[in-house]
Image (tube, grey):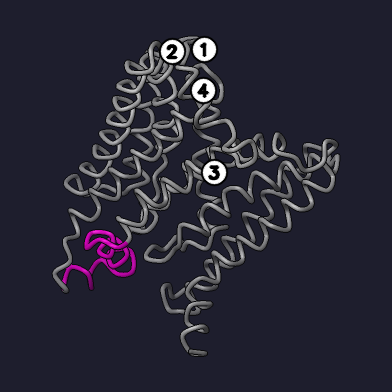
Amino acid sequence: MIGDTRYWLRENKGALAAFAAFVAMFALYAANHSAGLNANVAQTAANKGVILAIVAMAQTLVVLTSGIDLSVGMVMVLANCLASHIAAGETGVATLGVLGVLAVGAACGAINGLIVIFGRLQPIVTTIATGAVYYGAALALRPVPGGDVNATLADAVTGQVAGVVPASLVLLAALVALVWWPFRRSVLGRAVYAVGSSEIAAYMSGVPIRRAKLVAYTLSGLLASVAGLFVTFVTYSGEASAAAGGTYTLYSIAAVVLGGVSLFGGEGRMVGIAAGAILLEFIANGLLALHVNTYYQTVVQGAVLGAAILLDRLRARFFGRIRR
């Protein structure tokens, strides 16, 4: 029993550390917020954090294969712009529009995966190129900000459940339960971890490498489109913002590292990723509540990210994942 507990703690140390840091930062934020801790404050904070958490989940699926997806932010922006066109009107029509947005997001992820797998290109190079294409499509859809969204659907995912719990957290939990857990426990999910740990060893063991990578990239695009939909539900509009796409892409990588996922692939837990993403948002909000100058906020966020990356490299070197 003690041995099992130690093993569990060792395997989940990154997720536990991210969760503990999130709790501490949330307590600091709530204690120093002018309105105190109430349902509306929690809802606003959760809505902001969940967007990044979903994008970080999308990024994680690619990182687990030992890749980096620099297009997740642009897929999110494309989904946001598309949703502002087709997720409006009557609830039935808007629901079909939501399904259309999700299909487009999954297709974007699948395109990334197919190019990486059959084109034998580096994921970073591939996703820089495809990200530019996706941003161009978003700009074509929304040359200027605008659009609308179905209010019933928007209120359902951005409001509160029972007047207390932020609905966005329920959405995040649903994504983990409906997307992550079935994937993690599937043959292809285990194959993704194997590929990230050692692609050569996975190949020699008969692991379906191509299918595993394709599923990982497709689900990544799907989750990125969910984030774009959520942005539309929060803002009631679409905007082809290159700055937002780039920021969420970089912050998704930061959240992945803070959540205990190794950038060398094959290691990570979704609970830690969600905690890392929301932690990153609360670092900014907590510093704002403490009236820290905006310039110093950026410095602190960068220092936290740098420390997390350094720890990830040291851990990888300790376990023999890299030699230098």
- Disc 2 marks a residue whose amino acid type is Arg
Q: Quadrant of residue 185?
A: bottom left
Q: Which residues are magenta?
A: 185-204
Question: Which residue is rendered at x = 75% and y = 40% of the image?
Answer: 38
Picture disc at residue 241: 4
Mark 2 neighbour class, 10 Å CA radius: few under 14, some 14 to 19, many 20 or more: many
Q: Is residue 192 magenta?
A: yes
Q: Earlier in the sequence, mark 1 or mark 3?
A: 1
User: Mark 2: which secondary structure?
Assistant: loop
Contact (Cβ within 8 Å) of mark 1 with mark 2: yes
Which one is earlier in the sequence, the residue at label 4 or at label 3? 3
Task: From this view, report whether residue 232 is shown above or below residue 164.
Answer: above
Is 204 situated left or right of 13 in this image?
A: left
Q: Earlier in the sequence, mark 4 or mark 1?
A: 1
Q: Height in image: 176 above or below 7?
A: above
* Residue type, label 1: Pro
Labelled disc at residue 169: 3
The answer for how far apart the CA atoms under marks 1 and 3 are is 27 Å
Question: Dot 1 corresponds to which residue?
Answer: 145
263 lies above or below 53: below
Question: Disc 2 vs disc 3: Cβ atoms closer than 8 Å?
Answer: no
Give, as a three-letter code, the residue at label 3. Leu
Is 86 placed above or below 198 here?
A: above
> Residue at label 2?
142
